[in-house]
Image: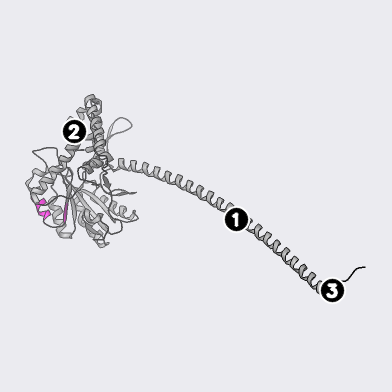
């Protein structure tokens, strides 16, 4: 015979049942929470792995792309180094073609050249020379620079400096490899250089005493070429001679003006390589000044290209007269400068222009374009400053 539960027992049973349901709900919640946490952590881990793999792939792609860019830039720099050699240098190479047949390498000279190159590599370890092509592109400043050639246009330049209130930089050289003649042996040149030094508007730098082609004077292995060509040193150009070439110019300038030459230098014809730059850094000249260039070309103005026309052998083997592609008239040069500025994203900001004071060009001399060029640039807001000023980090 069954006995019905009392009221108290029924209440207890109800409470126990509710507790059982609550416990079961809690267990289900915990299981779901655990499952969610596990899924979340698993998902986060998978997502993290995917992100990490993606990032690593991106890094790998970026590194590969960067390596390609670096390789491309290296190729461009190598091409640029060759293209930077001046037109004058290229003319030298063309003129030497007639010597090639009888200008074979001399074995002893070849050995001396290699020994000198090996010594330069050893001696310049830790020295790093810079080749500067342009100044600060943030400011509308232009550096007009001049290499001293015969010096016959020094007086014209001095007059422009006074008339247009400009500053310039002049690179000094004796121009010819001689101890008894050259630009430094002309009294008028020395007098004008002295006057320029007193204006406070001319900065003087070093263009070497003998005006050698340094790249060729270091590497040339033909004794005949060294004997015949005046722009090659007769002996292999070594580090002591490089130092002497600079020191002789320093001494001449110091004795003439009682001032010190700035430590900028420009090697003749732009004939350089990194080894030659490092050699000069070793003797205290770190900054080699080239000239600016962009997609339109170089600011090495062809004032030394004096032949408007050349002979060229045509397809029939006959000579014919053709226009010299490197010759520019005054008007063509002014138009070219306009194109150069218009084609550069920074205009002529920081531009380094190269001209020469005297040379073989006897008519339509390019120095006479300067008044028009200077006036036009000044009206556009440009200032003509020294190399030191165009290379610094502030507006002068």
Q: Residue tagged by mark 2?
A: 229
Which is nearer the eye, 274 or 43? 43
Q: Residue tagged by mark 1?
A: 41
Q: Is residue 299 left or right of residue 187?
A: right
**Residue at the outermost left position:** 187
Name the mark nearer the viewer: 1 or 2: 1
Q: Earlier in the sequence, mark 1 or mark 2?
A: 1
Identify whether 381 is placed above or below 103: below
Q: Secondary structure at mark 2?
A: loop
In this picture, which residue range is highlighted in magenta? 190-203
Q: Earlier in the sequence, mark 2 or mark 3?
A: 3
Q: Please report the residue visible at 20 percent of the width from the left and 28 percent of the height from the top.
A: 223
Marking on residue 6: 3
Q: Please report the residue visible at 9 percent of the width from the left and 54 percent of the height from the top.
A: 195
Q: Quadrant of the C terminus?
A: bottom left
Identify whether 310 is placed above or below 166: above
Disc 2 from disc 3: Cα separation: 131 Å
Which is nearer the eye, 90 or 131? 131
Residue 167 spot, x, y in % from top left: 18, 57
Residue 68 placement: quadrant: top left
- Circle 1: is it few (<14), some (14-19), or many (20+) Cα within 10 Å? few
- Circle 3: is it few (<14), some (14-19), or many (20+) Cα within 10 Å? few
């Amino acid at each position: 015979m069954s006995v019905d539960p009392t009221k108290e027992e029924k209440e207890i049973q109800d409470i126990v049942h509710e507790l059982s349901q609550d416990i079961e709900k809690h267990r289900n919640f915990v299981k779901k929470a655990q499952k969610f946490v596990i899924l979340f952590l698993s998902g986060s881990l998978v997502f993290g792995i995917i992100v990490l793999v993606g990032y690593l792939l991106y890094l790998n792609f970026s590194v590969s792309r960067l390596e390609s860019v670096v390789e491309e830039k290296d190729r461009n720099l190598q091409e640029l180094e060759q293209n930077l050699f001046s037109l004058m240098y290229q003319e030298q190479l063309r003129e030497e073609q007639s010597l090639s047949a009888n200008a074979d390498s001399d074995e002893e000279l070849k050995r001396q050249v290699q020994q000198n190159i090996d010594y330069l590599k050893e001696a310049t370890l830790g020295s790093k020379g810079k080749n500067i092509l342009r100044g600060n592109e943030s400011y509308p400043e232009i550096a007009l620079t001049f290499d001293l050639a015969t010096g016959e246009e020094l007086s014209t330049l001095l007059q422009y400096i006074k008339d247009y209130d400009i500053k310039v930089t002049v690179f000094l050289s004796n121009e010819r490899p001689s101890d008894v003649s050259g630009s430094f042996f002309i009294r008028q040149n020395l007098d004008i250089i002295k006057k320029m030094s007193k204006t406070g508007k001319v900065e003087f730098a070093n263009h070497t005493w003998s005006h050698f082609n340094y790249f060729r004077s270091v590497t040339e292995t033909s004794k005949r070429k060294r004997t015949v060509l005046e722009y090659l040193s007769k002996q292999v150009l070594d580090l002591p001679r490089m130092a002497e070439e600079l020191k002789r110019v320093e001494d001449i300038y110091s004795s003439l003006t009682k001032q010190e030459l700035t430590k900028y230098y420009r090697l003749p014809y732009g004939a350089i390589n990194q080894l030659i730059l490092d050699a000069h850094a070793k003797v205290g000249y770190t900054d080699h000044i080239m000239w600016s260039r962009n997609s339109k070309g170089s600011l090495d103005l062809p004032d030394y290209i004096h032949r408007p026309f050349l002979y060229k052998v045509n397809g029939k083997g006959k000579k014919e007269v053709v226009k010299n592609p490197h010759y520019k008239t005054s008007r063509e040069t002014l138009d070219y400068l306009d194109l150069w500025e218009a084609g550069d994203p920074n205009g002529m900001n920081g531009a380094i222009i190269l001209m020469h004071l005297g040379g073989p060009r006897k008519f339509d001399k390019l120095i006479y374009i300067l008044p028009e060029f200077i006036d036009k640039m000044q009206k556009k807001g440009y200032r003509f400053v020294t190399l030191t000023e165009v290379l610094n980090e502030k507006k002068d």
